[in-house]
Amino acid sequence: MVGTNALLSVLLVSLGMVLTPGPNMMYLVSRSITQGRRAGVISLAGVAVGFLVYLSAANLGLSVLFVAVPPLYVAVKLAGAGYLLRLAWKALRPGGVSVFTPQQLAPDSPRRLFTMGLFTNLLNPKAAVLYLSLIPQFIDTRAGHVLLQGFELGGAQIAVSLLVNLLIVAAAGTIAVFLARRPGWLRAQRYLMGTVLGALAVKLATESAPKAIA
């Protein structure tokens, strides 16, 4: 059983992470607006499975491949950075539109919604690095059941992410209507989101490979 202080620390870090704009948030918002809340929830289910994949890999020791095989980490992080840059360009390019602008898009099937949510999350290696570098700091080896503690702490992070993203999915339509009546705010949101995503892409691309936890 994890300690209260460790659990609260992970919850606070998780809240800060999920509130930072990123590809998961953008995809969930865009699908919720263009195809409805049900589509957003299905996409969120894919995102959740992506977190579970990384959490399981980290707890079972598979994520140390990023440490043992640096080119693998480089390939994954560059793929993630490229995806972020693509999203940033879509927001910042001349004639670009905000993620909160309703668009006429062909509806995706539930299977595609789920798959896109999954791969949107898997393309960002930050989740794996989070579980590899953050979670071990809050595990008390003296309490035993190290594997169980890892899953409990990771489960807390996933719960926070799902709750906040579910609120975003539910509110996406309302936010879109609010911004549509304020074109200046909509432009500001687009430039801010594009700039943040571009900065995240550069940071991710230039970040060194994670080091093994002692």
Image (cartoon, grey):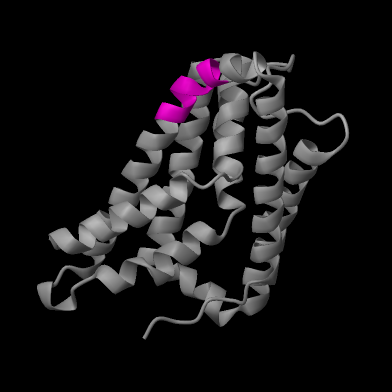
Q: Position of residue 102 (x, y in %)?
A: 68, 17
Q: Position of residue 124 (x, y in %)?
A: 59, 54
Foreground residue among 113 and 165: 165
Q: Position of residue 98 (x, y in %)?
A: 70, 29
Foreground residue among 105 and 99: 99
Give left or right: position of 74 versus 29. right
Q: Is residue 171 above or below residue 122?
A: above
Give left or right: position of 185 versus 9. right
Residue at image x 35%, y 35%?
163
Q: Which residue is farthest bottom?
A: 214
Q: Is residue 48 above or below residue 40?
A: below
Q: Which residue is farthest right?
A: 94
Instruction: For residue 202, say whether it is visible.
Output: yes
Q: Is residue 213 above or below residue 188?
A: below
Q: Is residue 8 above or below residue 163?
A: below
Q: Quadrant of the C terminus?
A: bottom left
Residue 101 lies in what quarter of the image?
top right
Instruction: For residue 154, say whether it is visible.
Output: no
**Helix, strand or loop for the magenta stretch, by majority:** helix
The magenta-colored residue range is: 167-175
Q: Position of residue 128 (x, y in %)?
A: 48, 62
Residue at image x 30%, y 73%?
137
Q: Is residue 129 magenta?
A: no
Residue at image x 40%, y 81%?
213
Foreground residue among 159 and 190: 190
Q: Quadrant of the N terminus?
A: bottom left
Foreground residue among 205 and 121: 205
Residue 149 lies in what quarter of the image?
bottom left
Residue at image x 16%, y 68%?
145
Q: How many marks?
A: 0
